[in-house]
Image (cartoon, helix red, strand yellow):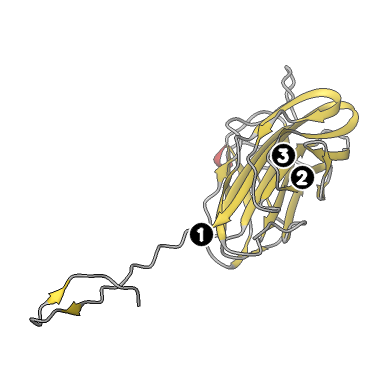
Amino acid sequence: MAWPSTPTTTGSGFGSGSGTSIATSGSVAVTAGDLIYVSVCWEGADSVITCSDGGVNTYTQVFGSNLNNGTGNPEPWNQCFRAVAATTTSVTITASYGGGADSRTFRTITVLVFHPDAAGTISLDGTPAGTGGISASIATGNVTTSTQAANCGLAITSYAFYGDDPSSEQINGTAADNITTNNGAEVWMLRYTNGFTGQGAATIGFNNWSAGLATFKIEPVAVAATPIPFVGSFGRSGGRIGRRYPL
């Protein structure tokens, strides 16, 4: 059991003018049990972000609050969502600002889908971390993970753009396995086995940025133990003796 070294499927959408939502420009193929990871970035003011694909899957916010650069002019913003695909289908994924009431500019949605090579239970491995700043380097803040079976850990960093494309993308000091770009916004990933305390990082020109790191694990589906059947034997009087023997 392991995660793939690159996303199984990706999808994206971009808007350079004002709009109340942003959607993938076409459908995204998913298989039941896949991890769906959605990064949403925008410029302008803060907003309550929701994510949906028409009711097929339920999306959960990754970060407790929207990530921003932490200054009085806090854009760019970043929030991510996660879901485990409930069925095999194709979906168009949409992020809405303020429930479709807020108009925002320079919007992106970047979708990464990961299909593990065997069925398993997917969950967070550690608490997601994110922050922002105005600097020449990106550092999400640390996430502490646990040791997994070979390549059963998956770390994902999302980056909100503000005019600079990152370089030297890393997670826990290791070069990313794969980088997905979308008009300046980026998402990069790394599989891991050994647990670590580390962060997503990259280099940019001196500028505004926000970024976050989330880590996931996949574990085998628990299989219920098979009960041992009762096989009786008879004594001299013909009565059943209550003993158990394996078949």
Q: Amino acid at mark 2?
A: Val
Give whichever of 161, 197 is nearer the camera. Answer: 197
Q: For mark 3, does the 10 Å Cα neighbourhood hold few (<14), some (14 to 19), or many (20 or more) residues?
A: many
| Distance CA(mark 2)–CA(mark 3) | 11 Å
Residue 184 numbered tag: none
Residue type at mark 3 is: Cys
At a point 72% along the width and 61% down the height, the residue shown is 8
Is residue 22 among what the camera can see?
no
Q: Reading the chain from its start, which is encountered first: label 3 or label 1?
A: 3
Q: CA distance from mark 3 to mark 1?
A: 34 Å
Q: Is residue 105 placed above or below 135 in the rendered structure?
A: below
Q: On the rendered structure, is 170 left or right of 70?
A: right
Q: Secondary structure at mark 1?
A: loop
Look at mark 2 in the image and give the residue it sits on: 187
Please tell me the numbered disc located at residue 221: 1
Residue at 70% in and 52% down: 111
Q: Quadrant of residue 67?
A: top right
Q: Quadrant of the N terminus?
A: bottom right
